[in-house]
Amino acid sequence: MSSWKSLLLRIGEKCPEYGTSSDFKDHIETCFGVIRRELELSGDDILHFLLQCAEQLPHKVPLYGTLVRDLLSLENIDYLISLYLSLYGTFQEALDFGNCDKIRILMRFFTVLMCSKVLQPGSLGVVFETLLSSAATTVDEEKGNPAWQARGDFYVTCILSCLPWGGAELTEQVPEEIERVMVGIQAYLSIRKQASDTGLSFFEDDDESGKDLADKDFLEDLYDRVQSLSNNGWKVDSVPRPHLSFEAQLVAGKSHELGPFSCPEQPHQPTALSGIIYGKQKYEAELKYPQRIRRLNIFSASKTEDLQPIDRFIVEEYLLDVLLFLNGCRKECASYMVGLPVPFRYEYLMAETIFSQLLLLPQPPFKPIYYTQVIMDLCKALPGAFPAVIAGAVRALFDKIADLDMECRTRLILWFSHHLSNFQFIWPWEEWAYVLDLPKWAPQRVFVQEVLEREVRLSYWDKVKQSVENAPALEELLPPKGSPNFQYAVEDDKEKTEQHALSAELNNKVKGRQTAREMTVWIEENLYPVHGPEVTLKVVVQTLLDIGSKSFTHLITVLERYGQVIAKICVDIDKQVMLIAEVSSYWKNNAQMTAITIDRMMGYRLLSNLAIVKWVFSPENIGQFHTSDHPWEILRNAVSKTHNRICDLRKEIATLKKSILSAEEVAAKAKAELEAAESKLTLVEGEPVLGENPARMKRLKSHAEKAKEEEVSMRDSLEAKEALLSRAVDENEVLFVSLYKNFSFIFMERLPDPSTAGTLKALKSIQADSMAVDLEESSAMEVDNENGMPKKSQSNGGRASNLYNIGEKEQWCLSTLGYVKAFSRQYASEIWHHIEKLDAEVFIENIHPLFRKAVYSGLRQPINEV
C-alpha cells in the first residue's frame, strides 16, 4: 500500500505509520505533508480514496473533514471542483435510490466539512430543510402517504444524528436556521404516528403490553437526547473536534456552497386505502428504510450511568458503522471496535449493541456467524474484561428466556453453542443444573437441552458429556448418541424375518451396482405384489438409508443413484409422509441427520413441501412443539427452500431483463450497420451491384442475424423463467394456505376460550395461582464487575424451589404462537402477496384472536389496523 494511503487509513490510530504520537493534530499535519507532495501526480486517486475512507470509517470523519480543509488551502481549483461534484452526485444518487447508509454518512461528512469551514452553514441548513420538508409532506394525510412514514422518520433521524458533530457551530453561526430546523422537527413529531414495534420486540412482554403513550419510540428518544445536548451547550465527549486545533487557519479559509438537492416522491396513496393495501405499503417502506437499531437493555443502568444521553447514541453509531463497513475483515473490525475515539469504557454498551444486532428482528444486517466471530475476536482482544461481560449477558438473557421472542431464542441457542465450541465448551453448567427440577416444557430447561444438542452437532457426544462433568445430572438433557436405528440390522440374538432377507438382497443389488431401472423392476415384480406398499417402502428406504449412513457423501451418492427408485414408490403426499416417517425412525437418535436427509430429498424432488408440512403437523410432532426445535427446524428448511427458489427466479429474471436491453441495443446497432451498408447498392446496366466489399457485407449480415438470434433466445429464456416463477408463486400460495390452516386447526383444539385467554398475559396467568415463583430473584439481571457472576446466590437449592408457573398446555400454546409469529415475520414479503387468499380461507371470523394477532404481529401490522 502507498504511504499516503496507509496514512489516510490509519489516521487517528496508535500505529507505526505515526510513530508513538497519539495527537490528532500531529496526525493531520503528517498526513497533509505527505499528500501535498503526491497531489499533483495522484490527485484523483487521493480524492477517491479520501472520500472512500470518510464513508467507510465514519468514526474518523472529523479528522478527514479537517484534512480536506487543509488540502483546499492549497487553492487547487481542479481538486475543489472534483470534490464538490463527487459529493453532490453521490448524495443525490443516494437519495434517489434510498441508500440509507450512504445518506446518513454523507450528511455527517457535510456537517464536519461545515465545522472545518469547507461548507457554508446555510448550505447545510438547506439540506436539513429539504429533508424535513419531504418528511412532513410524507406524513400529511392529504398531500402525502402516511404508510411511508418510515422514510420521513429516517430523514429526520439523519438530521438529528448530525447535530452532535456540528450543533455548536450551527448554533454559533446560523442560530436562526438551526432554531427553525428544530421547530420543524418538533412539528413533525407532533403530526406523525408513534412508531410501532409490533412483531419486532425482543421480548414477548414488550410486544404484548404495547407501547404506552408516555413511552418514546426511537425518534422521540433521539430528539430528547439532542435537546439535552443542546441544553448542555453542545458539549459531547465522544466526538473528536480536531478542527479546533487549526482555528487560526480555518478563519482565513473560504467556505463554499453546496448545490440544492431533491428528495424522491413517495409512492402514490391509493384512493381506496384498505387495511391490506396500507399494510403492504407500510411493510415495503419499513423494509427500504429500516430502523437501524432496537436497543436491547441487558445490563442495569449503573453500567452506563456515567454517560450523557447522547453518548450512548454516538457510541452505538460508531459500533454499528464498524460492524457495517468492516464486515469482510473481522480482525480489523474487532480492532476498531476496541479503539473508538471516546474517553470512557464501553464494554457493556458494546456487548448490548452486538447482541441487539445478532437478535435484531426481522433479521440481522449480516449472517449470525459474523457476530459470533466478532464476539470471539473481542474476547481475545480484551481477555480481562469482555469474556466476563459476555458471560453476564448470557446469564441475563437466560433469566428472561421465557419472555424472549422464539426467533431470538433460536438465534441465541445457535450463537451460544457455537461460541462455546470455540472456547473448549467451558461453561459453569452447575449454575444451571436446577433446570432439571423444572418441568420438561420450561423454557430454561429447553434452552439448556437445545444448546447441548447443538454442541453435539459441532463436536461429538463424549466431548460434550465431559464438558458438563461439574453438573453430571445434566447428562439427562444430552441427546442420544447419534447411531442409526436400522430395523433390519443382523444381530445374533434376534430372529431374522423375511423382511431381513429382502433388505439383505436389496443391499447386495446395490453392491452389485445394479441400475435404478433394474432395481425398480425387481421391486415391482418381487417385493410390491407380495408385501404391499408399506413393507416395500420400509424395506427400500431403511436399506438405502443404511447404505448411505456412513457419511454425507454416501447419502448424496445413494440419493443420486437410486432416487428414482424412491420416487417410484412415493408417488403421492401420503406415501411421502410415510417416507419422512421412515427417515425420522432411522435417524431417531440424530436430529441433524434427519434434517439433512429430508432437506436433500426435497432438493432431489423426492419430497414436496406439502408432505413435509403434513408430517410436521402429525400428532407425534405436535406433541413436542414446545419441548424441541426439531420439527420446527425441518419446517423452516422446507419453507426456506421454497422461498429461496422464488427469490432466485426473481433475480434471474431481473438479470435477463437487463441482458435483453443490452442485446436489443447490440441487435439494433448491427441492423443499422447492415442497412447502412445495403443502402450503398448501385445499379449497373439495371442490375444491383454491391457498393461495399462483399466479404464485409456477409460479415455484417451474419453479425446482425446472430445478434437477433441471441435477443430472441434471451426472450424465450425470460418467458420460460417467468412461467416457472408464476408456477412457483402459485405453489407457494398453496404452501402458506396449508401451513396456516394446520396452525388454525391445532389452535382450535388447544387454545383456551378467548374469554379466559384473550391475551398472552391472560394465557400465562391461568395456572399462576397454583404455582409459586420468586419473581424478584428470577428477574435479576445484575452482573458482578469482576467475573460476570450474578450477585444473587446461584445455589441449586435456591433455584430448585422456583417452580415454573405455567402449565404444559399453556406453554405449548405460548411456544407455538411464538413460532407462528416468527414464520410470519420471516416470510412476510411472500405472505403479503397472498394475504387476500389467507384472509378469505384461513383468517376468518371464528379463528382465535391470539392466532390472528400472532400472524399479523409477524407481518408488523397492529391488529387494530387489519
Image: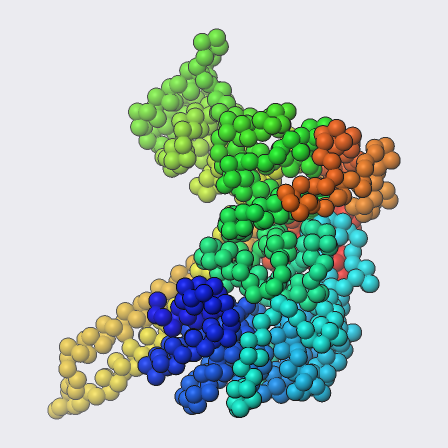
Residue 240 x/y as whole percent = 58, 71
Query: In which quadrant of the rendered view does residue 140 lie?
Result: bottom right
Q: Residue furthest front?
A: 20
Location of residue 414 with respect to 19 vertically, above or below:
above
Q: Residue at x 66, y 71 (%)?
A: 236
Q: Residue at x 73, y 83 (%)?
A: 179
Nearer to the camera, 266 or 257 = 257
Q: Residue furthest left?
A: 685
Location of residue 818 with respect to 249 vertically, above or below:
above
Residue 535 x/y as whole percent = 50, 22
Can residue 820 be seen by looking at this rendering? Answer: no
Which quadrant would the N terminus be assigned to in this image?
bottom left
Q: Residue at x 39, y 81 (%)?
A: 36
Q: Residue at x 51, y 48 (%)?
A: 380
How many callouts does the rendering have? 0
Q: Is residue 677 left or right of residue 857?
A: left
Q: Is residue 661 left or right of residue 202?
A: left
Residue 597 x/y as whole percent = 48, 35
Nearer to the camera, 803 or 312 = 312
Location of residue 509 with respect to 644 vertically, above or below:
above
Please say which color scheme the image uses.
rainbow
Nearer to the camera, 625 or 85 = 85
Can residue 209 be seen by looking at this rendering? Answer: yes
Residue 663 x/y as whole percent = 35, 71
Location of residue 793 with respect to 271 vertically, above or below:
above
Which quadrant would the C terminus be assigned to in this image?
bottom right
